[in-house]
Amino acid sequence: MKRECLTVRSCHFLKIIIPFFAILLFSIPDVCGQNGADTKSSKAVLERLIGNRASEFELTIIENKNQDQSDSFEVETQGNRVKIQGTSNTALCYAAYNFLRDIGAVLVSWEGNRIDLPKSWPRYSKKESTPFQYREYLNACTFGYTTPWWDWKRWEQEIDWMAFHGINLPTAMEGQEAVWQELWKGYGLTDSQLAAHFAGPAFLTWQRMGNINSLEGPLPQEWINKKGNLQKQILERMRALGMHPIVPAFSGYVPKAFAEKHPESKIKELKTWSGGGFASTYLLDSKDPLFKEIGKRFIEMYTKVYGHSDFYLADSFNEITPPVSEEHKYEELSDYGKTIFETINEASPGATWVMQGWLFGDNKEFWTKEATSAFLSKVPNDRLMIQDYANDRYKVWENQEAFYGKQWTYGYVHNYGGSNPVYGDLNFYRNELTSLLKNPNKGNVAGYGAMPEGLNNNSIVYEYIYDLPWTQGKEPVNDWLKNYLKARYGKNISNSVFESWQLLIESVYSTKYWETRWWNDRAGAYLFFKRPTLKITEFKGNPGDKEKLKQALDILQRESKNFDKNSLYNYDLLDVSRHYYSLCIDDLLIECVKAYQQKDLKKADTLYKEIEKQALAIDKILSGQPLNDLSYWLQSAWDYGSNAEVSKLYVKNAKTLITLWGGEGHLNDYASRSWRGMYAEFYWPRWKMFLQALRASEISKSPFVEEDVRASIKKWEIKWCESPEMYKGR
């Protein structure tokens, strides 16, 4: 019997999109490959997706004969059986999903899964391999911008998503505070001293990287315990699927109380991070014997709690200039690299040190070829992996001689801060990959993937990026797009729908980086999302082609009558709509400010009303996108607490992260969100205050003091963040 449905995980959507009878799960016998490898975990992933039809799949793990241990798979249908052979469980999961998507039966995405299984499987045969041993995923920042309030159910969904997309090198940062807490207590630190050290739940990422301390804390003990238990489940599932989770290591940062207890140690107080306003952080010198002692003790304690790991992340200088002397710069850098590696190796022999390559692009002035090569010089080539994941912004590997013989992975951030304008660049990703594979100077590139800071947006980008390691760019984007749309919307895609997506490729999905999110040193996805200023009249425009975007939107609206209101098609229509009209608001804002400055009050007032109308309209239509909802984010934070006091702390963290952020620099609005509730409850009220003050000054002929108005807006922002009020929608 043919079954067509759209399934949505309950942690994302509040209801099932298209109701269907519950699938009766039953036990499926384990299938072992020629080398006896267990496929129970990959079977379970498939079963969670398609229920009892998973019994029609024969999964077999075959011996990996590739010298570089890169994966391959074969899929073939025989009668009503789907026979898949692959070199790992993640290869099997990707192969099964690739098959289901190729025949238009399944599409797995953050916003929902479309499932329409045929009565019998069509003829099908496919064989693919990848030159990349590793397919990486998740930025260290994702654990602040997206996952703070995730429970096991949501993590299970994400790990299944990883498996279906062939990912085998995920970053796994949850749960480490339980180990740090025990470790620092072993050095005599008290609970109150640690409370002054640990940042709040949404800001732990940056405390872990040595950027901040204590921001939006204290960190509740229940959080530490809950995340500790969660990490055990995460690692167990990842390892069962043959993934190689990257777990934390010691990079040299110590609490202030530790530094005060050890005045004889070589500990440097670092300059405040990212524009100032944050508490100082303290870095232990690599030559101090305590560095290795603490680092080894952490890994030993971590292993005791969470089991053995092969990859350890340690970043000593993330967006921080190394505190080395000018006269002995290279010697001191090489000692840092040597000590970090030896610490990991002595605590976990054979393990690989992983570091983010972000710092080399972010601070080009310091990280010259000489500085980088010195830092890496005393580490064995096969025991360090550099994640060069920002190739949509920085071409680090080309300028660093492909990292001097070390292993490295190539990829993209794509999403910064969870901010969610509609963009990406499919042709860029394809062309860059084919160019990389042909480049004789690519060095020891071992992996590929995406390291987004935020998830749940622009699904097409990630769908395409994780196909590229397998197709190696041999398939034209338009050919890939046809198959993608068939799987996402159904088999009968009209020429008009395909035309609309070609226009979307040309208009918004030809933007490799949304550069205006950092316009004039002000963060925010759109002008409307930035703290108000008169300077917006100098804005030169957002990336992309707005005219072609409107043409695509018009077609999508006309064709929407052929699709269910709760389909992924309608989800995409809303996505394109809120993006287009947000761009329109930006244009209207510029004209409105100009009109007030030119004393054309009639025109300015008309524009003011239109801005308000469009902002509230966007807010209303986003009710059809439960993921893009302030109330969902805040309710998730509230529900993560066990009592009102803790829940209020979590809600304040949740509000602050996506608005003020913290410090005195330019991070406010860095994590701005195009969400229901944010338009009506945060972005428009700010601009309303600003425009009303501007209008009043023109009427009264009094000076408009922008600094004072912005200061009053900031006070309003602080009050908004501190309020425990939950947004429930209009």
Image (spheres, rainbow, N blue to C red):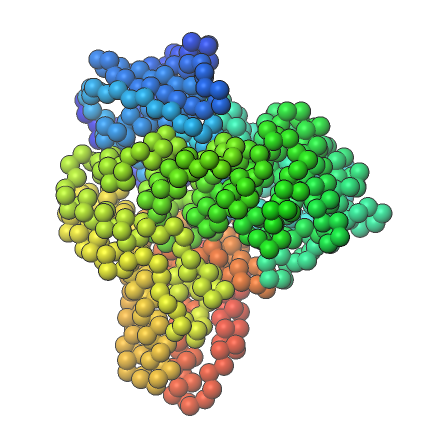
Residue 696 location (% of width, % of height): 40, 84
Most distant residue in the bottom direction: 701
Above or below, comparing residue 496 to residue 52 in the picture:
below
Quadrant hosting residue 471: top left
Most distant residue in the right direction: 264
Count of numbered marks: 0
Instruction: Left or right? Give the position of 199 relative to 346.
Output: left
Nearer the observer, 574 or 549? 549
Residue 630 location (% of width, % of height): 41, 53
Q: Is residue 177 visible?
A: no
Residue under the image location 40 percent in, 55 percent down: 514
Residue 94 location (% of width, % of height): 37, 27
Quadrant in which the N terminus appears: top left
Quadrant hosting residue 293: top right
Residue under the image location 62 percent in, 53 percent down: 366
Residue under the image location 45 percent in, 64 percent down: 519
Instruction: Left or right? Give the position of 710 relative to 302.
Output: left
Most distant residue in the front direction: 440
Quadrant in which the C terminus appears: bottom left
Instruction: Left or right? Give the position of 165 relative to 650.
Output: left
Nearer the observer, 438 or 270? 438
Quadrant hosting residue 127: top left
Above or below, comparing residue 188 to residue 280 in the picture:
above
Residue 298 location (% of width, % of height): 69, 34
Q: Is residue 69 visible?
A: yes
Nearer the observer, 124 or 248? 124
